Amino acid sequence: MYEIKERVRYSEVRENGKMDLLGVVNLLQDCSTFHSHDVGMSIEKVLELKRAWLLSAWNIELYALPALYEKITVGTSPHLFRGIFAYRNFWIKNQSGDYLVKADSEWFCIDTEKGRPKKITDELVAPFGEPKDELHLPPLQRKISFPEEWIEGEDFLVPREYLDTNHHMNNARYIALSEEILYQSSGEPAFSFTDSGWEKENGKNLEQGNEKEEKKLSIGIRAEYLKAYTYGDRIFPRVALESERKCVAFYNQNKELCCHVEIRKNPEL
């Protein structure tokens, strides 16, 4: 297990004073990067071994967004190594120890010389110690089924600021872009922590005078990565809105599917 202490900065929040999805996912990714560095398996060290880790899928459970000034703890723990795949838990807690975020992730190891997946060796993972499942989440489901009915969003170029050290569009950007694309498509936020928020976003406003108590929800966010964008690629999004979930599919100029992102409401807390 590995944890770091953080405080939510003004540069990380939106107009509502809360962190957006880009900030949340960046915190998780940064935590694993620091963990790897601190045990002697930094990005640079892994590249020396002609290996790299690529993210295959996210499964994120969001209970609340971190707020401006809030002191938080961000943690991670590898919990399974199998074949070419590695699985990592992540979490964000507030000062009271309550979970704001729980997440699982699937990564795979590649041979950087051959550009092919490669079985994980003890040399790569022994420095992390014994894998431990800290969160006991359900098994990660990577594949996302995209609805048959969808609308096409406005296409745009991948700018340089989206690139990471792999020269690919950073994984957090797909989730952040989904939040914005869904807003542009519907005129409403991509998610809400109440039932009424989802009904409003799907054109089902509650009737005036309805005194039904709002249910507090958690939000599920899943991402399935298939092909990376690089600088100069063009992003062609497809958007699908359903009563229980919203999806964005990312295609490139060659009509190749790059990523699926799903944002759904979970049962009441």
Image: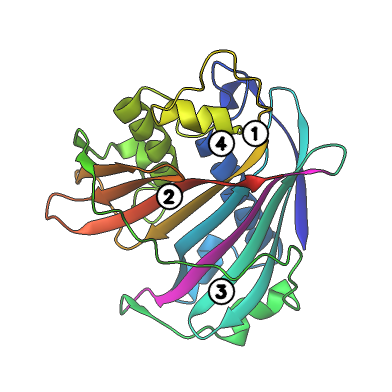
Give the class, few, some or many, for how many residues have Cα within 10 Å of label 3's Cα (few <14, many ≥20).
Answer: many
Give the quarter of the image for residue 40. bottom right
Q: Nearer the viewer, mark 2 or mark 3?
A: 2
Q: CA distance from mark 2 to mark 1?
A: 18 Å
State the residue in front, 179 or 196: 196
State the residue in front, 99 or 88: 99
Give coordinates of residue 98: x percent, y percent.
81, 43
* Numbered badge on residue 23: 4
Q: Earlier in the sequence, mark 4 or mark 3?
A: 4
Q: Earlier in the sequence, mark 2 or mark 4?
A: 4
* Numbered badge on residue 65: 1
Residue with the mark numbered 3 = 86
Inspect the image, locate mark 4, and give the three-letter code of the amino acid beneath it: Gly
Establish if 45 lies above or below 59: below
Residue with the mark numbered 2 = 262
Q: Earlier in the sequence, mark 1 or mark 4?
A: 4
* Numbered badge on residue 176: none
Q: Name the residue: 43% across, 50% down.
A: 262
Secondary structure type for disc 2: strand
Q: Name the residue: 31% across, 38% down.
A: 160
Secondary structure type for disc 1: loop
Inspect the image, locate mark 2, and give the three-letter code of the amino acid beneath it: Glu
Question: Quick one: which residue is furthest to the right in this view?
Answer: 96
Q: CA distance from mark 1 to mark 3?
A: 27 Å
Residue span colored magenta: 98-113
Q: Are marks 1 and 3 in contact (CB under 8 Å)?
A: no
Residue 105 colored in magenta in the image? yes
Secondary structure type for disc 3: strand
Give the class, few, some or many, for how many residues have Cα within 10 Å of label 2's Cα (few <14, many ≥20).
Answer: many
Give coordinates of residue 220: x percent, y percent.
55, 49
State the residue in front, 160 or 142: 142
